[in-house]
């Protein structure tokens, strides 16, 4: 009865296995990256003084995008009463928490002095969008935790009656709450609804604020656009929705059981993706028509520069064209293909985030800067180093494992409920 | 005549202050205050001051004239590109003075070829411009970089900087550099490494993992040469090292608040330009073409 692997069917079980192996593998190779980062600091990182933010910052905005996106989709359930997504409501919240944690790690290792991260809470400069981002991050994180706790409290209390260590852990997690009744269940759900409602503007401000963090930088014309905060939000919704497709395909009894949810998510993601595309197209078109050299320079780099493959293959190919085809042609009626579209979108949007950060930075702010002072740290070309890649993989692996564990133990459809019923 | 008198007066003052006290260190003061206060006091103080600075910025936004008048000095440079031969002695002097590691150079000399074949290229030396409205200062999440009230020099508090590098992205002039912790192989060991950098009069030993490694660094107009009153002295060599060493005398340094000063006269009488005026940063470094 207490079997851990309770797969409904073979494919879902296989996917779960792949998930665990992948998570473990990435986590292990990530250890090298961690050791390298903690031991040698930034010595083995390839960013410099021109391209001063690299893979880690790109991943940071990618992860918070996933988090904000999946949270906003969960709010469809708790704020707007979308019954279609009810099954995945709490998984979406869990996804939002885990991806937010992954974001925290990727930006933390990027700091020159990791041990001083606390200073941003105390010496916050409210003129800085980054300070705002950090405060909103904290508020959003706290809200997520509290909302999830209220959502799961009933289950936590129920599982606290388990014997041995698990029972004690669940007892601790429930903070000794009394046994749930009709009334408390209702009250909890009401609290969840209120928190989710507050969470919507917080998540919008938080992720839109990160877009603003880039958008306000007048020195980088590639970023300096009013579209940026909105582009960030749209991309968040697309990538977050796509991630939820992947999650529901593997977890919560697998994709056979969640057909309807996945199809609904697929439609939602497709719409958002097309809107996102429209915004990006508008951004590119306006810039090229205006033709102001500094404004076009970053775009030229992204579209025709040395890393054009990130744009054409990664972002447009994997992250846009194939998913759009999968979601519009006959394949949209087959759950497997929709799930694949979700996976491709999740991967493709990493490329999209890379294309925001790196071409925006990889231009000489003063003509002749890189030839006036010749150094690998003062150069416009950037490719992440081995330790950057490995540490990033480690963060992904960590996130996967943590999510797997969370899903396993906090599962709303756990075994005890069946006994009770 | 008045100028001569003033200069004499200044000189006696300088010799007094140099002889008697050690130079005041603004950053150090800040740190001491922080250490004495309770954490909560710092918290409220830090946050309060950021709010205050916000309102202050709003009040003084048009033209920034308020900030200018209350400032004792307004240090800046006038760089005559016709006198610059592109020898890069300023870069070397800066490197030696501030002991900057590889990948960090507070000033650079870029050359811009002209279309006419018979002309030498235009060389420009480019330190930090210590803008009147520095975008780097606004974006710093912890206010670790700020514009000094007394002389408008933009500095970095190495003990507060968390190394997020947002200021590097925000600077339109590429004047900021991150210290990755690299060393020149020649100086990896040996006497040069043992000499601390005089930056900010802090004389830090650049050891693994400790500031300024992992911080953003930038030109300070060699403010460690200032006396207690915040003045430089050209005669005795207490002068920004790039200006001091310039072979063609292309770098003029001085106080724009003093109308008698060389730099103030130059921008009055000549046709100076500043880089990227359209961004509204109002640099304090002017170029003569």
Image (cartoon, coloured by chain):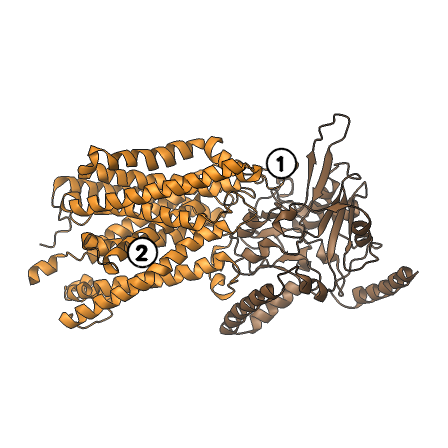
Chain colours: A orange, B brown
Task: Decide: is B33 above or below B64.
Answer: below
Q: Picture coordinates of residue A220 (x, y %)?
A: 54, 45
**Of the pair B252 and A259, the residue shown nearer to us:** A259
Pointer 2 residue: A97
User: Which subunit holds the residue at mark 2?
Assistant: A
Image location of residue B254, percent across then percent down: 78, 54
Quadrant in the picture for the N terminus of chain A: bottom left
Q: Residue at x 63, y 47 (%)?
A: B278
Quadrant occupied by the C terminus of chain A: bottom left
Q: Are both tags, 1 and 2, on one chain?
A: yes
Which sits earlier in the primary sequence, circle 1 or circle 2? 2
Label 2 neighbourhood size at 10 Å, few (<14), some (14-19), many (20+)? many
Which quadrant of the figure has residue B14?
bottom right
Judged from this view, the residue extending furthest toward the top is: B117
Report the residue that reaches farthest toward the right: B1
Residue A384 seen in this snapshot: no
Residue at horizontal 87 percent and vertical 61 percent from the top: B7
**How many other residues sit within 10 Å of disc 1, few (<14), some (14-19) or many (≥20)?**
few
The residue closer to the viewer here, A368 or B247, is A368
Camera sees residue A258:
yes
Which of the numbered marks, if any, corresponds to residue A45? none
Q: Is residue B105 left or right of residue B4?
A: left
A9 vs B154: above or below? above
Q: How far apart are marks 1 and 2 (CA)?
A: 43 Å
Circle 1 is placed at which residue position?
A: A374
Q: Which secondary structure, mark 1?
A: loop
Are the residues flagged by discs 1 and 2 in contact, CB closer than 8 Å? no
């Amino acid at each position: 009865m207490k079997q851990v692997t309770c797969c409904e069917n073979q494919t879902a079980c296989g996917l779960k296995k792949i998930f665990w192996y992948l998570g473990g593998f990435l986590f292990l190779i990530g250890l090298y990256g961690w050791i390298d980062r903690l031991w040698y600091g930034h010595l083995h990182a390839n960013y410099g003084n021109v391209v001063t933010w690299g893979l880690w910052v790109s991943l940071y905005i990618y992860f918070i995008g996933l988090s904000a996106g999946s949270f906003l989709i969960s709010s469809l359930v708790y704020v707007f009463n979308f019954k279609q997504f009810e099954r995945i409501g709490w998984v979406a919240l869990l996804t939002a928490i885990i991806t937010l944690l992954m974001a925290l790690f990727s930006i933390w290792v990027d700091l020159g002095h990791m041990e001083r991260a606390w200073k941003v809470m105390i010496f916050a400069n409210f003129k800085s969008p980054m300070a705002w981002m950090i405060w909103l991050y904290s508020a959003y994180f706290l809200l997520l935790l509290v909302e999830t706790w209220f959502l799961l409290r009933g289950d936590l209390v129920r599982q606290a009656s388990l014997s041995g260590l698990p029972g004690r852990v669940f007892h601790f997690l429930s903070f000794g709450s009394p046994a749930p009744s009709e009334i408390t269940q209702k009250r909890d759900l009401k609290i969840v609804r209120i928190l989710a409602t507050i969470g919507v503007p917080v998540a919008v401000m938080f992720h839109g604020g990160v877009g603003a963090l880039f958008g306000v930088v007048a020195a980088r014309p590639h970023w300096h656009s009013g579209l940026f905060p909105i582009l960030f939000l749209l991309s968040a919704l697309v990538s977050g929705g796509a991630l939820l497709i992947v999650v529901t395909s593997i977890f919560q009894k697998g994709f056979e059981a969640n057909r309807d949810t996945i199809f609904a998510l697929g439609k939602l993601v497709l719409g958002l993706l097309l809107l996102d595309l429209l915004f990006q197209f508008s951004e590119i078109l306006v810039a090229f028509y205006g033709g102001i050299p500094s404004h076009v320079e970053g775009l030229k780099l992204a579209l025709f520069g040395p890393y054009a493959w990130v744009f054409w293959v990664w972002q447009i190919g994997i992250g846009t064209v194939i998913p759009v085809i999968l979601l519009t042609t006959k394949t949209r009626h087959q759950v497997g293909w929709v799930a694949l579209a979700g996976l491709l979108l999740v991967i493709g949007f990493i490329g999209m985030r890379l294309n925001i950060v790196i071409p925006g930075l990889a231009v000489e702010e003063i003509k002749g800067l890189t030839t006036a002072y010749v150094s690998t740290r003062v150069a416009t070309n950037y490719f992440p180093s081995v330790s950057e890649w490995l540490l990033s993989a480690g963060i992904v692996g960590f996130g996967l494992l943590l999510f797997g564990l969370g899903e396993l133990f906090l599962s709303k459809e756990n075994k005890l409920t069946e006994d009770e019923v | 005549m008045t100028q001569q008198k003033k200069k004499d007066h200044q000189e006696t003052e300088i010799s007094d202050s140099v002889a008697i006290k050690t130079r005041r260190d603004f950053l150090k003061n800040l740190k001491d205050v922080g250490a004495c206060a309770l954490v909560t006091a710092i918290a409220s103080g830090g946050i309060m001051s950021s709010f205050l600075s916000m309102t202050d910025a709003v009040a003084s936004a048009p033209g920034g004239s308020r900030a200018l008048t209350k400032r004792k000095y307004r240090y800046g440079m006038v760089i005559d590109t016709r006198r610059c031969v592109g020898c890069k002695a300023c870069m070397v002097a800066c490197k030696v003075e501030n002991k900057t590691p590889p990948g960090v150079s507070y000033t650079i000399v870029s050359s811009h070829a002209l279309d006419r074949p018979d002309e030498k290229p235009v060389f420009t030396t480019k330190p930090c411009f210590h803008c009147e409205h520095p975008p780097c200062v606004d974006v710093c999440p912890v206010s670790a970089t700020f514009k000094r009230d007394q002389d408008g020099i933009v500095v970095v508090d190495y003990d507060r900087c968390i190394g997020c590098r947002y200021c590097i992205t925000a600077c339109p002039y590429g004047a900021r550099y991150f210290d990755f912790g690299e060393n020149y192989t020649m100086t990896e060991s040996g006497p040069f490494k043992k000499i601390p950098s005089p930056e900010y009069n802090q004389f830090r030993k650049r050891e693994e993992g400790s500031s300024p490694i992992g911080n953003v660094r930038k030109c300070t107009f060699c403010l460690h040469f200032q006396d207690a009153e915040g003045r430089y002295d050209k005669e005795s060599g207490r002068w920004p090292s790039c200006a001091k060493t310039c072979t063609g005398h292309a770098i003029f340094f001085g106080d724009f608040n003093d109308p008698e000063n060389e730099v103030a006269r130059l921008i009055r009488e000549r046709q100076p330009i500043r880089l990227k005026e359209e961004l509204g940063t109002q640099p304090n470094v002017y170029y003569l073409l």
